[in-house]
Amino acid sequence: MYIALEGIKGVGKTTILTHLKTLLAESMGKYRFDVISPTHSTPDDHPLEVQYAHEPDNDELREQVYAHRSNYHASHTDWQADMIIGDRSIITSLAVRWHRVNNGLSALSHFKQVRAKEHLIAIPDVVIQLDCDADKLLQRYALRERCYGKQEECLEAILALKQHYQSVNHWLKTQEAIDTVGKNIDWIALDTSHDGYLTVLEQVFMIVQMSMQKI
C-alpha cells in the first residue's frame, strides 16, 4: 500500500508527516513501513545537483533534477514493505507541469512523458491532498519568512497549481487513466485552512488506518 501526501508548499505536509511517522512506528505492529520523499535532494556531489545549485532558474534543468531525485529515492525505497508513505509522489510532477496539457498536449501524452522520466517510482494507491485557502497560504509564506521561489509565492501561481491538482485528479478518474495506470487511485482532499495540525493529523492517520485494513 503506497499512500502519498500531496499539496502546494505551505499546506502542512512536513509537519503532518513528521508526526505521522511517529504514530505509525507506534501502531504498525507486525507491519513494516517505509517513507519516500522523491523531491528531496540527492547527494550534493551529483553533477545535476551541482549544476542546479548554480542554475536554480533553469527550468529544463529543474525537470531533469527532479526526475533524477525521484528515481534515486525510489531506488532506495523498500517497496516490499507493507506500507509506503510518500512525502509527495509522481503526482507532483504531473501537477507542476500540467500547463503542457493546457497548451495542447493530451493528458495521456503528458503522463507518459513524466512516467518515462520518473520510471522507478511506483504510482500511489492513495493520494491525500492537503489543501489550503490561497490567502492563508500567502500569510503562511510571509510569517515563515522562507523563500519558496518567486514563481510559487504569488497568488497567480498558487491558483494555477491548485487548478492543476484538480485537473490531475479529474484525469486519473477517467477510464483512459485507469487503463494506463492500471488501477483506480483513491484521492482524498483535506482542507487545512482553519484546522490545527493535530486535527489534520488525526484525519490523515484515520485514512492511513483504514488503508491498513486492506493490507
Image: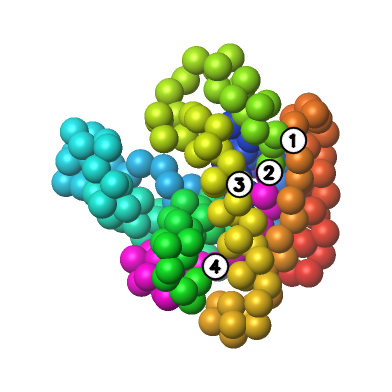
Element assignment for label 3: helix
- Residue 74: x and y in percent read 43, 59
Distance from Cα at disc 1 to Cα at disc 3: 14 Å
Q: Which mark is residue 24?
A: none
State the residue at coordinates (41%, 43%): 40
The residue that label 3 is drawn on is 162
Q: Residue at x 83, y 49 (%)?
A: 206
Q: How crowded is mark 1: few (under 14 residues within 10 Å), some or many (20 or more)?
A: many
Quadrant including the C terminus: bottom right
Residue at 46% over, 74% down: 106
Q: Which amino acid, mark 4?
A: Ile
Q: Which residues are drawn in magenta?
A: 109-130
Residue corresponding to mark 1:
192
Tag 2 secondary structure: strand
| Residue kind at label 3, given as amino acid type | Lys
Q: In this view, does 13 lie to the left or right of 204?
A: left
* Residue occupied by mark 2: 130
Q: How crowded is mark 4: few (under 14 residues within 10 Å), some or many (20 or more)?
A: some
N-terminal-most mark, 1 or 3: 3
Report how far apart the C-alphas of labels 2 and 1 lie in the structure.
Answer: 6 Å
Task: Decide: is 56 above or below 110.
Answer: above
